[in-house]
């Protein structure tokens, strides 16, 4: 049997475990709620969050220690329980013995409960509650209350950690994404192509690059305007992306230049793909202000042999594009 201090120490240790951004709130908090049930000897612990921290209308259940679908549990409306919400906003710990019969009941539970609710805070404001519930009369000791408040704080830290992780991942994503086209940018390309080269060494598989340069793009900007040029770039990116495999990586290399990393792809396959893309782009119909914009592109294909460096292969693909431009554009050159 754990002492209260040992139980809180164990809770702190569990709450420090690494979280996964892909986790839903129920799975994110399950281990903490299980710890709470074990120490407090209650039937169920649920986590309830308000719909809007600055303009609360209701609490909704987001996690439970029991294997139930939390989405089936009815919301708790502020209009029906104004006193309860007032105490929650004040940060009070709420205890009840067979008094809140309609509060925090799931659909299979129509009996009165003994409840201990502690507030979850976010930036100093009440974000929700941890509700500990048992169907039998129960006297909540001071140690129970202290532990429940620690449990609420642990859940709060998990929720804040998840929010921080999502923000960090979003910022990291923005660093590697071209805002206009939604494609990965040159910085991402530099990292991804190195990873592809490392895989090539390990697996002894082919690797190719396709460099693409849009033909007469300056003319499009001059004749139709820069807004039209942005539309052309965005539609080009979507059209090409739809032609690629999941493992392929199309990046905006700069301006009207793009580059594709093709793992497990030799020169012949890369050239065939480039030709399909060339035909698809030539057949694109881009409308802007009731005018039709036609587009073509020049392609340079280069296979990255095991003994070739990344820089040499990029240069090789760039030279191939330059040759495609010189022979009349709208074609594929392989070197």
Image: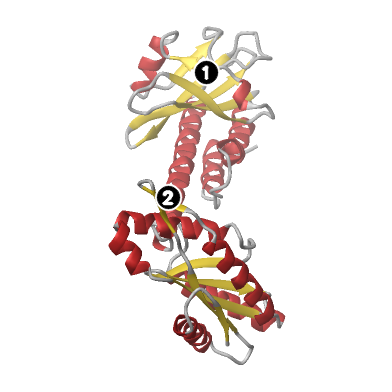
Q: How many marks?
A: 2
Q: Position of residue 214 (x, y in %)?
A: 44, 69
Is 208 placed above or below 111 here?
below
Q: Position of residue 161 (x, y in %)?
A: 45, 47
Element type at marker 1? loop
Give the left or right position of residue 258, taking residue 31 as reference: left
Residue 139 seen in the current view: no
Badge 2: few (under 14), some or many (20 or more) residues near its Cα, within 10 Å? few
Q: Give me the residue at 49% from left, 43% from top.
A: 158
CA gap, disc 1 and disc 2: 48 Å
Question: Are the two marked residues, 1 and 2, in contact with CB atoms closer than 8 angstroms?
Answer: no
Q: Give me the residue at 53% from left, 48% from top.
A: 21
Q: Position of residue 329 (x, y in %)?
A: 47, 77
Give the left or right position of residue 31, taking residue 236 as reference: right
Nearer to us in this view, 199 or 19: 199
Label drawn at residue 75: 1
Of tags 1 and 2, the one toward the viewer is 2
The N terminus appears in which quarter of the rendering? top right
- Going from N to C along the chain, the mark reached first, 1 or 2, is 1
Nearer to us in this view, 138 or 252: 252
- Report the residue marked by disc 2: 287
Is 107 placed above or below 204 here?
above
Element type at marker 2? strand
């Amino acid at each position: 049997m754990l002492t209260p201090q040992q139980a809180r120490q164990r809770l702190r240790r569990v709450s420090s475990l690494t979280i996964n951004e892909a986790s839903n709130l129920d799975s994110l908090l399950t281990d903490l709620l299980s710890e709470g049930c074990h120490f407090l000897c209650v039937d169920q612990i649920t986590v309830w969050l308000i719909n809007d921290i600055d303009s609360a209308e209701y609490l909704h259940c987001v996690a439970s220690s029991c294997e139930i679908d939390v989405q089936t549990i009815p919301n708790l409306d502020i209009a029906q329980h104004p006193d309860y919400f007032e105490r929650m906003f004040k940060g009070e710990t709420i205890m009840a013995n067979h008094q809140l019969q309609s509060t925090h009941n799931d659909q299979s539970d129509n009996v009165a409960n003994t409840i201990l609710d502690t507030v979850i805070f976010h930036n100093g404001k009440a974000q929700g509650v941890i509700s500990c519930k048992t169907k039998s009369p129960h006297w909540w000791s001071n140690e129970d209350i202290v532990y429940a408040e620690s449990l609420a704080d642990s859940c709060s830290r998990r929720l804040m950690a998840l929010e921080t992780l999502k923000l960090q991942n979003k910022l990291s994503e923005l660093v590697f994404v071209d805002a206009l086209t939604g494609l990965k940018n040159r910085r991402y390309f530099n990292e991804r192509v190195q990873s592809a080269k490392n895989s090539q060494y390990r697996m002894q598989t082919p690797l190719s690059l396709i460099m693409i340069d849009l033909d007469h793009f300056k003319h499009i900007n001059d004749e139709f305007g820069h807004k039209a040029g942005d539309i052309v770039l965005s539609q080009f990116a979507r059209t090409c992306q739809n032609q690629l495999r999941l493992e392929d990586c199309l990046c905006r290399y700069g301006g009207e230049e793009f580059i594709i990393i093709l793992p497990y792809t030799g020169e012949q396959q890369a050239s065939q793909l480039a030709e399909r893309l060339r035909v698809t782009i030539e057949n694109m119909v881009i409308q802007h202000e009731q005018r039709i914009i036609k587009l073509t592109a020049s392609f340079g294909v280069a296979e990255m042999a095991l003994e070739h460096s990344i820089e040499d292969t990029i240069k090789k693909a760039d030279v191939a594009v330059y040759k495609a431009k010189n022979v009349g554009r709208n074609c594929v050159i392989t070197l």
